[in-house]
Amino acid sequence: MLRFCIFFFTLVLLLSCKKASNNLELSTVNKKDSTITKVKTETEKLKYSKEDFDFILKDKEDINWHPKGLLVMKSDYLPNYNDIGNILFYTFSKLGALKWQEKMDDYSEEETEVELERIKNLSLDAFKKEFEIYAFVIDKQYIKDTPEGPYQKETYVKELYHCNDKDIWRKIDSFEVKKEDNFLKEREWSKRKLAELVN
C-alpha cells in the first residue's frame, strides 16, 4: 500500500510539473505575441518613416530664434519636395525652454547669431541629442496648389509628432478641421499645444 501511495504521489507530482511547464511555455509565447502585436500596432500608427522626417530636419538653414527659447524651422521647399506634406518643426533645448530662453536673452545680437550658426552646423545626431523636436504636420492629401503656392484645403487634419530619446517619432495629438470656421480653432489648438510643450 505504501508503494502504491508513493507511486501515485510521484505520478501526480510529475503531471502537475508538466502542466506548469506547459503553462509557462504558453505564457511566454503569449507575451512574445503581445509584444510583437504592440510593436506592430505602434509602427502602423505612424504614417511616415524616420527617414521622411530626417530628410527635412537635416536642412537647418531656415532656423529662427523665437521667444520662450524655441527654434522654429520651416523649410521653403515644403510640401512640394518631401513625402510628408506641410511641416513646421519646433525645437528647444533639452535643458528646458525657459532656462534656454534666459540664457539667450542675456546674449547680445552677435552672440545670438553665433549660437544659431553653431546649431545650424550640428550634425543631425548631435542636434537630436541637444534638442527636443516636435513637428506640426498637414499631410499632402490636404494640400492643394494655388497661385500663391501650396496651401491646405478647407477641411484637413493637423497632427503633432514628437521625436523621443530613442530617435523614434510618435504622433501625440491631432486636430481635425471639418469646416472653414474651424481654422481659427486649429490655430488656438496649435498655440495651446505649444504652450504645454514649453512649460
Image (spheres, rainbow, N blue to C red):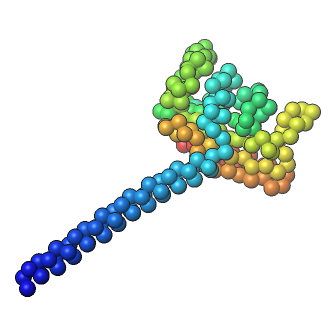
> Looking at this view, is 84 or 2 the one in front?
2
Q: Is residue 146 above or below residue 34?
A: above
138 left or right of 146? Answer: left
The single residue placed furthest to the left in the displayed view is: 2
Q: Position of residue 23 (x, y in %)?
A: 35, 66
Q: Position of residue 80 (x, y in %)?
A: 80, 31
Q: Is residue 26 above or below residue 66?
A: below
Residue at coordinates 80% horizontally, 55% vertically from top-left?
178
Dividing the picture into quadrants, the one containing residue 69 is top right
Residue at coordinates 38% horizontally, 58% vertically from top-left?
28
Dividing the picture into quadrants, the one containing residue 143 is top right
Dividing the picture into quadrants, the one containing residue 64 is top right
Q: Can residue 46 be seen by looking at this rendering?
A: yes
Q: Position of residue 49 (x, y in %)?
A: 63, 38
Q: Quarter of the image containing the C terminus? A: top right
Q: Can residue 108 be seen by looking at this rendering?
A: no
Residue at coordinates 54% horizontally, 39% vertically from top-left?
168
123 left or right of 187? Answer: left
The single residue placed furthest to the right in the displayed view is: 147
Q: Is residue 44 above or below residue 65?
A: below
> Looking at this view, is 37 or 168 the one in front?
37
50 left or right of 189? Answer: left
Q: Quarter of the image containing the N terminus? A: bottom left
Q: Position of residue 7 (x, y in %)?
A: 14, 77
Residue at coordinates 66% horizontally, 34% vertically from top-left?
52
Q: How many marks?
A: 0
> Looking at this view, is 104 or 36 the one in front?
36
